[in-house]
Image (tube, rainbow, N blue to C red):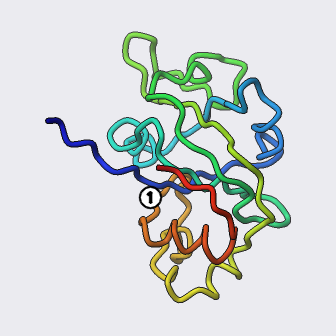
Amino acid sequence: MIALEPPRYWLMKSEPADCSIDDALAAAHATVPWTGVRNYQARNFMRDAMQVGDGVLFYHSSCPEPGIAGIARVASGARADPSQFDPMSPYFDAKSTPAKPRWLLLDVQALYKTRLISLGELRAHPALAGMRVLQRGNRLSITPVQAAEWACILRDCVRTDVSIQ
């Protein structure tokens, strides 16, 4: 019998001017390609660790009110991000080729919007003190979330019976 790995959980940052939770919910099947990741560690998370069905905290960043804005799930495996090949894209990478792409994307399916859960609110929960998004100097656009942190956020901040299983 093959043992299935338990779902993993992630916090994924998006600038709402590029793709907000509302944009994702309005997309076909509420699914959007997560383009523009240009950090090797975040890329490696997509390539090596993220699996279809993993839970996602959809986080709005680089905006007046940053914070968790919704709950989503990973909806596809990683594949080449076409924006790296488009000279008109702000994510163009002249060193990347279709034969040897450097950057990946995966699809994220928005499940529902939450009220905005700010960094201040997250910091107020001692159980979340270890979250990477709360660590000084953390700028990664994708970070792992521990199962206990995920449960705490859903239970204490989102207050929902929806879960990613």
Residue shown at the point (46%, 21%) measured from the top left = 96
* Residue 104 at x, y percent in the picture: 48, 30
Quadrant containing the N terminus is top left
* Residue 31 at x, y percent in the picture: 67, 30
Left or right relative to 38: residue 111: right
Position above or below: 132 against 33:
below
Left or right relative to 89: residue 128: left
Position above or below: 29 against 153:
above
Q: Residues within 10 Å of mark 1 (few under 14, many from 20)?
A: some
Position above or below: 129 against 25:
below
For the view shown, which residue lies furthest in the top direction?
99
Residue sitting nearer the eye, 156 or 62 = 156
Residue shown at the point (61%, 73%) measured from the top left = 155
Residue sitting nearer the eye, 102 or 10 = 10
Picture quarter containing residue 134? bottom right
Q: Secondary structure at mark 1?
A: strand
Position above or below: 28 against 70:
above
* Residue 117 at x, y percent in the picture: 73, 70
Picture quarter containing residue 33? top right
Residue shown at the point (69%, 48%) measured from the top left = 14
Q: Amino acid at mark 1?
A: Pro
Left or right relative to 135: residue 30: right
Q: Give the residue at mark 1.
A: 144
Residue sitting nearer the eye, 111 or 104 = 111
Residue shown at the point (61%, 25%) measured from the top left = 92
* Residue 16 at x, y percent in the picture: 80, 48
